[in-house]
Image (cartoon, grey):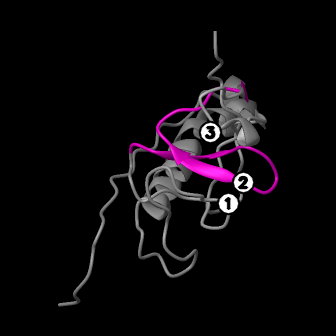
Amino acid sequence: SSQGTHFEVEKHFCPLPTDMSGHRAVALMPLGMASLQLLLKAVATDPSSPAFGPCSGQWKNCSKSRCCSDGNFQCFEKNSVFAQCRPFCYVGVHYDEPPQYQSYWTCSIKSPLGLETSSQVSHS
């Protein structure tokens, strides 16, 4: 008996009609994206992950770790040199910051695997 975590995945295959065979990749896309999201979540929520080093804490700079130890926070990019673990982010200048730090936030979400995504949250 081996120690450690063991996962079982149930697989279901449904044949596509002949006239839909060209759409096979599209039909499998959501499963692939779900798998990627699970992988990213597993890496981002494991602060002891040796591949990427420890994830950053709440409100801490995550420009190097590219992940947050709290699952309710994400690593949002401000610019090419600073990113912060925050629960949300809006694109633009954050006027609640001290005046010397009031510059534009891109709010791209950093990931340990280098797959950046743009945030859709805007300040109104």
- Write down the residue under mark 1: 63
In the image, residue 84 lies in the stretch drawn in magenta: yes
Q: Quadrant of residue 45?
A: bottom left
Q: Nearer the viewer, residue 99 or 6?
A: 99
- Three-letter amino acid code of the residue under disc 2: Phe
- Out of 95 and 108, give the one closest to the viewer: 95
The reply, left or right, for residue 55 in relation to residue 62 is left
Residue for badge 2? 82
Q: Which residues are magenta?
A: 72-92
What residue do we see at 30% from left, 66% from top?
Answer: 7
Crowdedness of circle 1 by 10 Å Cα count: few (<14), some, many (20+)?
Answer: many
Q: Residue at x 62, y 39 (%)?
A: 29
Q: Secondary structure at mark 2?
A: loop
Answer yes or no: do the residues labelled 1 and 2 have beta carbons within 8 Å?
yes
**Above or below 64: residue 51:** below
Q: Quadrant of the C terminus?
A: top right
Q: Earlier in the sequence, mark 1 or mark 3?
A: 3
Counting residues from the start of the chain, the first of labels 1 and 2 encountered is 1
Image depth: mark 3 or mark 2 in front: 2
Give the alpha-carbon distance from disc 3 to disc 2, as whole Å. Answer: 33 Å
Of helix, strand and loop, which one carries label 3? helix
Quickly name the residue at label 3. 29
Which residue lies at the image location 40% right of the left edge and 45% below the top edge?
Answer: 12
